[in-house]
Amino acid sequence: SLGMKFVPVPGTSLLFCIWETRVQDFEAFVKATSHNAGEGWRNPGFSARGSNLDPDAVFSQTPLHPVTLVNWNDAVAFCRWLTEKERAEGKLSAGQEFRLPTAAEWSQAVGLPAEAGATPEDKDSKIGNVYPWGAGYPPPKGSGNYSSEGDGWYPNMPVKIDGYTDGARFTAKVGSYTANRLGIYDMGGNVWEWCGDWFNAERQGRVIRGASFLQGAPGVLLSSHHSRKPPGTRDFYNLGFRCVLTVGTSRR
């Protein structure tokens, strides 16, 4: 009902959204509910004032950019709202729901083979030289929105990819770069994506995957890289999410 598009992922019983949740999708949720997601997602540039971002750089978003400055709880609330909305409209069965992917499901969507380990922490970066674009570093042109030449808006910019340009200083509109073999965009770069799992058995943060427009180091861009943030974190300009849809009997 929001115009989000989904594709199947072999080996799962899910449909993955082909792009990260957009500003316009999240705005529809906030307008329809009393959920307090803060104000950063509406205007990241305003939220950046007083931070270590370049004051001369304007961080602006259109409705088609990935929503940022949202925490894990915001993402879960969005998925729950969309599920209830589409069930009420007769578009989903009682057995279908929108939710965040698990780290293992995300790995399948990005094209990784089976990973050894009991937790995302155990699996972190265990498969080398496999990236969202394939084998080998640096990424070929058009692979995604990473920390690249011409992105000098952040005083303490992490590693930049020599010789790589992506045409975006901050986030880019979803679907701007080459999709993977399943037709899914931005599984690497643009914004980090919340997953449903805890990072480890001690519950030290929720999993985030895929890196963002601020990352360029080979190890961080690995498809097998698992990172984490506290679920209440809402102050990162490169942190968003992607929805999946469980497959059941549709009423359509």
Image: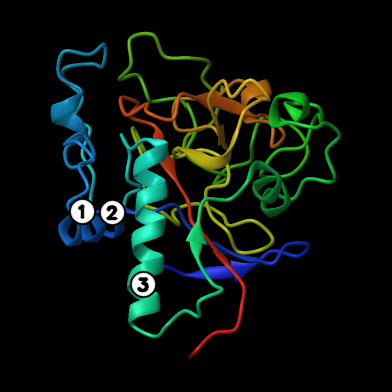
User: In the rendered image, which quarter is residue 236 located in?
Assistant: top left
Name the mark nearer the viewer: 2 or 1: 1
Q: Residue furthest bottom?
A: 252
Asked if the residue at tag 1 contacts the one at tag 2, i.e. Cβ–Cβ closer than 8 Å, the answer is yes
First-in-chain label (3 vs 2): 3
Q: Position of residue 36 (x, y in %)?
A: 20, 42
Query: Is residue 167 visible to us here?
Result: no
Q: Is residue 104 above or below residue 50?
A: below
Residue toward you, 110 or 117:
117
Q: Position of residue 226 (x, y in %)?
A: 64, 29
Which residue does the numbered mark 2 point to in the structure image?
26
Give the crowd class for mark 1: few <14, some 14-19, many >=20 residues within 10 Å.
Answer: some
**What whole-number distance in Å separates the C-alpha atoms at marks 3 and 1?**
17 Å
Amino acid type indicated by mark 1: Val
Which residue does the numbered mark 3 point to in the structure image?
3
Give the crowd class for mark 3: few <14, some 14-19, many >=20 residues within 10 Å.
Answer: few
Amino acid type indicated by mark 3: Gly
Which residue does the numbered mark 1 point to in the structure image?
30
Query: Is residue 103 visible to us here?
Result: yes
